[in-house]
Every structure is written in structure tokens, then in C-alpha cells.
Image (cartoon, rainbow, N blue to C red):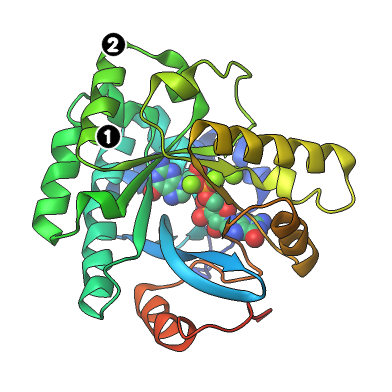
Amino acid sequence: ISRRRADRRPVVYDPAMGTDVAYQVRLQHELRRAVERGQLRVVLQPIYDSRGPAARIIGMEALARWTHPELGVVPPQQFIPVAEESGLICEIGSFVLKEACRLKAAVDAAGHEELFLSVNVSRDQFRAGGLPEEVAAALEASGVAGDRLELEITESLLMEHTAEGEQQLARLGRMGVGLVVDDFGTGYSSLAYLQRFPLTKLKIDRSFVSGLPQDRGANEIVRTILALAGSLGLKAVAEGVETAEQHDALQQLGCRQYQGYLFSHPLEAGEFKSLLVRRNQGGAPSQA
Ligand code: C2E
Ligand code: MG
Ligand code: MG
Ligand code: MG
């Protein structure tokens, strides 16, 4: 049932493949092999603090990457769901956590210990129960400080609010690890959980940012999220900032942290380090 390709040219993912069951089965098989063979890697997207025109790198998000020798680049939107359905996400999550901490330690060694590292965590990594121990081990092995690590979790995870999950989040909070609600505003509408967990930051979803500055609704939603974060003592970061107009609108609304193609695409660790050397002396965000 595998798709045999006459040529071995890498192909970029075609959305039409997403509904192909045979392709999904193959992806699952290939992903398992990729994990065993160490073919996954981690890239870093800088996160900026910007007041006025100057922008400074204050952290980075670790993002998983998979390039298959025949299939080419398989985007996370394809392989993360496959990993979640097949149970591989725990292994992949462990790899990303350890690798991201290792990369962060290399950045630290270049004199940038103050930067935070943000790592995405799937629901099943909490279900397994040992996430706080795993995080403690990754921090210990890399020498990264607990208060320099953030975990990005989804609203749906928080909505489950099992006693077990709550305990794990509380333990992580006590370790100084930040807890960020990713894609905030796209999940459930109940806000009760914002008080229940030791959250530290809301990440405003790209779908709202992309409506700025024209869309009135997007403006009001972003304004409301920023006000909510402010009144709960949480930080806020805007993701998917692509244009100077979006950045200006966000600044007007009082947002301080930014991530997006306007500032930088996700980078290989080496590129990230050279960017740090060039950028953290100040200057306006480049459009490049
Ligand atoms: P996310 O956590 O919300 O990550 C942000 C995504 O937006 C990344 O896509 C990033 O490359 C992309 N992005 C950043 N700036 C811009 C922008 O200005 N415009 C646009 N259009 N996109 C931007 P990526 O790397 O393809 O990852 C997609 C999703 O896959 C992530 O969304 C996250 O949910 C998941 N993912 C990626 N790596 C991991 C991982 O290690 N573990 C888990 N559990 N999920 C991951
Ligand atoms: Mg994220
Ligand atoms: Mg996000
Ligand atoms: Mg998002």
C-alpha cells in the first residue's frame, strides 16, 4: 500500500495527501523509523521584546522538523497529529525537550543565559504522568535553569483538568517552569481554568494577529486578551506577526512580546546564534 515513487526527488507536502489513508499509514511507519534513526531535528524561532522601533531577542520557540529522504519535508501539521494518534508523540516530545535544552545550553554558553526557551507539549505527554521528572532530567543534563524554560500547552489540555494533570502543572510551576497557553482564543470559551493553573503567559493566536489592523473584531479580541492577561498578572505574546502594520497595531494595543516572520523565520541553531550576535545590539526589525 505504500506509494512507490519512480524518482527519489523530495516532494513538498501536498494537502491532497492529507486525506489519503495509505499515505497516513506510511507516514506513521516512516515516522517511527525516523524517531529510531534520529532523523528529527529542532529549529528555533526567536521571540522579541519591542518597545518603540527597537526589537530585542528575549527567547525562542523550539519547533520540530522532519525531512524524509524520499517524501521530503513533512510539516509538523502533518506529522504531529500522526504522532499523537500513534502514541509516538511521547518519544518525539522527549526528544524535542532534550534537544531544545541542549541547543539552549549552547546559546547560554555564547553569553545569552537570560533568553527563555519555549517547548510545545502535547496532551499525551501529561497523560503518561512523568513529565515533571522528564523536564527536571532535561534541565539537569543541559544545565538550563528551570525559570528559563516555558512549556506551551493547549486550552484543551487545561480543560480536562484531571487531578493528575493539575498536580503535574503545579509541580512544574514550583520548578519555576513557565506555562504558556498556546493558540489562545481558539479553544474552549471557559476561562475558569486561567485561575486554576499556575499559568504565566498567553500566546495570542495568529488568526487574530492576521486580522490586524483592519478587522474590528480581531482588534477587539486582541485588546481583550491583553487586558485579561494584564489583570491576571500573565504575560502575553503575539504569534504569527508578518507585517509592520500588524506590529504597529499590536504595539498600540500594548503588546510587548512578538514572534513571526516579520522578525524571523524559525532558524537552525547555528543561524540563531549568529543572529543573536548581530541583533541584540538593538535596531529595528528587518523585513528580510
Ligand atoms: P505553534 O506551536 O502554534 O507554532 C507556531 C507555528 O507558526 C510554527 O509552525 C511556526 O513556524 C509558524 N509561524 C511562526 N511565525 C509565523 C508567521 O509569521 N506566519 C505564519 N504563517 N506562520 C508562522 P510549524 O513549525 O510548522 O509548527 C506547526 C505546529 O505544529 C505548532 O504550532 C505546534 O502546534 C506543532 N508543533 C511543532 N513542533 C512541535 C513539537 O515539538 N511538539 C508538539 N507537541 N507540537 C509541535
Ligand atoms: Mg507553540
Ligand atoms: Mg501557537
Ligand atoms: Mg497558532
Q: In the rendered image of this protein, does residue 64 appear above or below residue 244?
A: above
Q: Is residue 75 visible?
A: no
- The type of residue carrying mark 2 is Ala
| Left or right: 280, with 96 as reference point | right
Residue 173 is marked as 1
Q: Secondary structure at mark 2?
A: helix
Q: Kindly identify the amino acid type of the residue bearing the numbered disc 1.
A: Gly
Q: Left or right? Give the position of 110 relative to 248.
A: left
Q: Position of residue 245 (x, y in %)?
A: 80, 64
Instruction: Report the disc number at residue 13.
Output: none
Q: Nearer the viewer, residue 71 or 104?
A: 104
Q: Residue at x 30, y 45 (%)?
A: 92
For marks 1 and 2, the one nearer the N-term is 2
Q: Which residue is mark 2?
A: 163
For the point 24% across and 20% down, which residue is it? 167
Please state the horizontal and vertical placement of residue 287, each as a whole percent of the image: 69, 79
**Where is residue 61 shown, x and y percent of the image?**
43, 57
Q: Nearer the viewer, residue 10 or 165?
A: 165
